Amino acid sequence: MAKINLLLLFGGVSTEHEVSRVSAASVMSRLDRDKYNLLPVGILKSGQWFLHGDDDFDAISDGRWEKSKGNLPAFLSPSRGDGLIVFGTEKVAKIPVDCVFPVLHGANGEDGTMQGLFEVAGIPYVGSGIGASANAMDKSVTKVLVEPYQVEQADYMLVQKQEFEREPQKIVEAAEAKFSYPVFVKPSSSGSSVGVSKAKDREGLHSALCDAFRYDGKALIEEMIEGQEIEVAVLGNGEPIASVPGEIVPSREFYSYEAKYIDNSSGLFIPARIPEETSQIVRQKALDVYRALSCRGLARVDFFVRKSDGKAIFNEINTIPGFTSISMYPKLFEATGISYGELLDRLIGLAMENQ
């Protein structure tokens, strides 16, 4: 069987650039090179694309790859059949691409923008399509789409940046009338808990909104759900499957960016420490959310299991979840009986279905 030319994209113009690099290095180290001709293309924060010629995974993780002398400027052509255009020292080459694996977290990668390029180029790609990617990225849209499926969610309030800049006191007072402190504030379109804050008073709420608006023009104020943080991995197209649930015990006050990727001391329990009946409910709700957004390929769906009554409360969905060595998505499927390498093969196979 001929090898698959696999374009793996990493980095990107995103606040999650560094996480993407670590995820990509992990994926690259586990891809079966007997099956794939790997074309690793890194995107700088400034937006330039380079075909990276080395297999130094550590250099990709920590960013040293950018200094590699073997890097060649490249881009994915929107013209069907051209594939990857690479600018060598003496000539321009066209490399066919059979499939794209976008290991791009956050904006300009997980939000439908890259997916649009792949669609125009006519190249299969791992993960959800344009609409599902965009809708899952925008938490305010996700909440509206999930509502008809009777999946319980945290109560929330949507705030526009212009509204807040015009009448900040009115916004804060409206939030105080709706919620009791503490509340969570998050950019509507962001991942890896970037820009997420826990506000305990009026001053903290104002500050949290200012921070959230650094990343997006919309922000959500949400009631705090006291309970266990539960995550479920989903895999598939028409007939997706849900992993065993896992549980996060944050090392900090909540599962912030630092708790996820910097201090490495958050607790992980797989399977989650919840009753079997609750586990089955959470798995089903994860599939409901996945279908509500018309996802395909993969996603991680996050919940709270509320302490007061044991109910599963939907939090958010990530269509390109982390693939680092400590990320829950591959760990959850390993616990479900699918190894990391097999998981990657399945994802690429799902991308190329019906092509």
Image (spheres, rainbow, N blue to C red):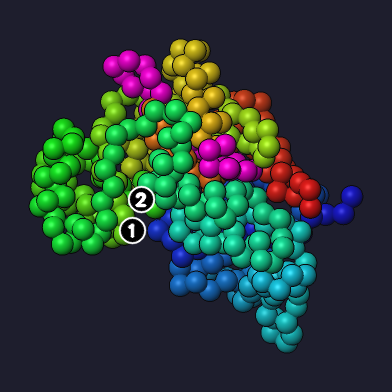
Quarter of image, res 295: top right
* Residue 304 image point, x, y percent: 38, 27
Q: Is residue 105 left or right of residue 87?
A: left
* Residue 99 image point, x, y percent: 72, 56
Total numbered badges shown on the rendered structure: 2
- The answer to the question of whether label 2 and label 1 lie on touching residues, with beta carbons closer than 8 A, is yes
The amino acid sitting under disc 1 is: Asp
Residue positioned 48% across, 49% down in the render: 135
The residue singled out by tag 1 in the image is: 216
Identify the mark nearer the N-term, 2 or 1.
2
The answer to if 299 sits in the magenta stretch is yes
Residue positioned 67% across, 71% down in the render: 78
Question: As rendered, which of 279 and 327 lies closer to the eye?
Answer: 279
Looking at the rendered structure, which numbered label has been put on residue 187?
none
Q: Is residue 217 left or right of residue 128?
A: left
- Disc 2 element: loop
The amino acid sitting under disc 2 is: Ser
Label 1 crowding class (10 Å Cα cut-off): few <14, some 14-19, many 20+?
A: some
Whether 323 is drawn above or below 52: the answer is above
Label 2 crowding class (10 Å Cα cut-off): few <14, some 14-19, many 20+?
A: many
The magenta-colored residue range is 291-312
Whether 338 is drawn above or below 104: the answer is above
Q: Residue furthest front?
A: 148
- Disc 1 element: loop
The answer to if 18 sits in the magenta stretch is no
Q: Look at the image and tell me whether residue 248 can be seen.
A: no
Residue positioned 59% across, 29% down in the render: 242
* Residue 149 image point, x, y percent: 48, 31
Residue positioned 32% across, 15% down in the render: 309
Q: Look at the image and tell me whether residue 168 can be seen.
A: yes
The residue singled out by tag 2 in the image is: 188
Quarter of image, res 311: top left
